[in-house]
Amino acid sequence: MKLYGYFRSSASFRVRIALALKEINYENIPVHLLNEGGEQYKADYTEINPQQLVPSLIDGEAVITQSLAIVEYLDAKYPGVMPLVPKDIWLAAKARQIAYAIACDIHPMNNLRVLQYLKGELKVDDEVKNTWYHHWVLTGFTAIEKMLGETCDQYCLGDQLSLADVCLIPQVYNAKRFNCDLTKFPRILAIYEHCMEHDAFIQAAPENQPDAG
Amino acid sequence: MKLYGYFRSSASFRVRIALALKEINYENIPVHLLNEGGEQYKADYTEINPQQLVPSLIDGEAVITQSLAIVEYLDAKYPGVMPLVPKDIWLAAKARQIAYAIACDIHPMNNLRVLQYLKGELKVDDEVKNTWYHHWVLTGFTAIEKMLGETCDQYCLGDQLSLADVCLIPQVYNAKRFNCDLTKFPRILAIYEHCMEHDAFIQAAPENQPDAG
């Protein structure tokens, strides 16, 4: 398998976590989102990923884009190694609703291309851009902290690692990089600290990628 | 089952399509997103949905939020009636990557609360807000039109209705409401026109909901 990604991309980080948890060897192909105006816009890469986003996974003939589609694909292909979507449909819904609360309601607003649009088209300054970033993280995390409720423990679903953690950890990592104050989210922080002691999460972390600058 | 939703919400529309396709009877409970500053912010509703977003599904003891988590849940619970996630894992990935290209990369930027933030906090005027809206629809649809490639026909995956159509149709409906020029997307438009002749899609359409104003 080949993974096109960028060390700092949260969506790439999700897929790297899943690949590491499932102990899959893969070739890591960096796509630098800033160099030369963004390598994701090059014609060759646009053929692979018409959205001009990372990550993209190549598995033989199959080309899969969208991080969560890739994670579900890996989970269905290798169900025996560290399953990420619980078999119980109600637990699966719990995992997915936390994953999507991040992937659909926090991350998209704070994606590089959106921050670039705010600065470029809307001409907002860095302070307004940072306020925007923090607003969506804090709104999202406030809800997720409640959603985790009493069921969370080491992981979002108690003692069972899932798709929810695969999304949560990169979002927390990113929020820390943007200096968000996360002290109001003790459940989220406890899960983050626990996961970041796990080999697969360490291996997948941005600073441990070959393209980390 | 009970569905908390709003007639114009694209995310609610997705779930209504899935419920109609699976021929599930449900009680429709309107949550008006604008009246009284937004009924989704009321304490009672926040207990159900900590994100203060629609839709939310109640199925006995289970409370499920996030439209795509609900659709996956319904599909797993009623696999025999109009399956929405293909059994083949590569086709499932194709369906999910189109669904997420909409649910993670178009819809979130154009959600009511984001448009409200642009107007309220960033003080942009209606023209700038509309340009923003159109930008994310056109960027997203340009990619999806390519992703549909030669495989699409009546539906995103050829002759097989899937999760991808459940997301695509509400996004097209919404884009039309905001007067986006969609003539450059013949594949998307053909799928839309075909689906909107289908009883389940008609039944689920915003104008056919009890709360349509």
Image (cartoon, coloured by chain):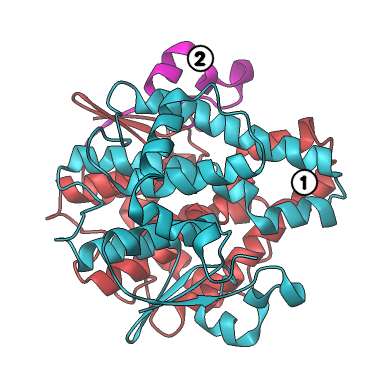
Chain colours: A red, B cyan
Q: Quadrant of residue A84?
A: bottom left
Q: Is residue B40 above or below residue B175?
A: below
| Amino acid type, label 2 | Lys
Quadrant housing residue A125: top right
Between the residue at mark 1 and the residue at mark 2, the CA separation in whole angstroms equals 27 Å
Q: Which residue: 51% across, 53% down?
A: A104
Label 2's element? loop
Q: Which is more toward the observer, A49 or A199?
A: A49
The span shown in magenta is: A25-53
- For label 1, the residue is A129
The residue carrying pointer 2 sits among few (fewer than 14), some (14 to 19) or many (20 or more) residues within 10 Å by Cα, namely few
User: Which quarter of the image is occupied by the C terminus of chain B?
Assistant: bottom right
Of B95 and B157, which appears nearest the observer?
B157
CB within 8 Å, label 1 to label 2: no
Give the residue at mark 2.
Answer: A42
Camera-nearest residue between B194 and B130? B194
Q: Quadrant of the N terminus of chain B?
A: bottom left
Q: Chain of mark 2?
A: A
| x then y, percent, for residue A158 | 33, 77
Give the residue type at disc 1.
Lys
Give the chain of mark 1.
Answer: A
Which residue is painted at 20% across and 37% down in the image?
B90
**Would you say A59 lies left or right of B13 here?**
left
The answer to whether residue A49 shows anywhere in this view is no
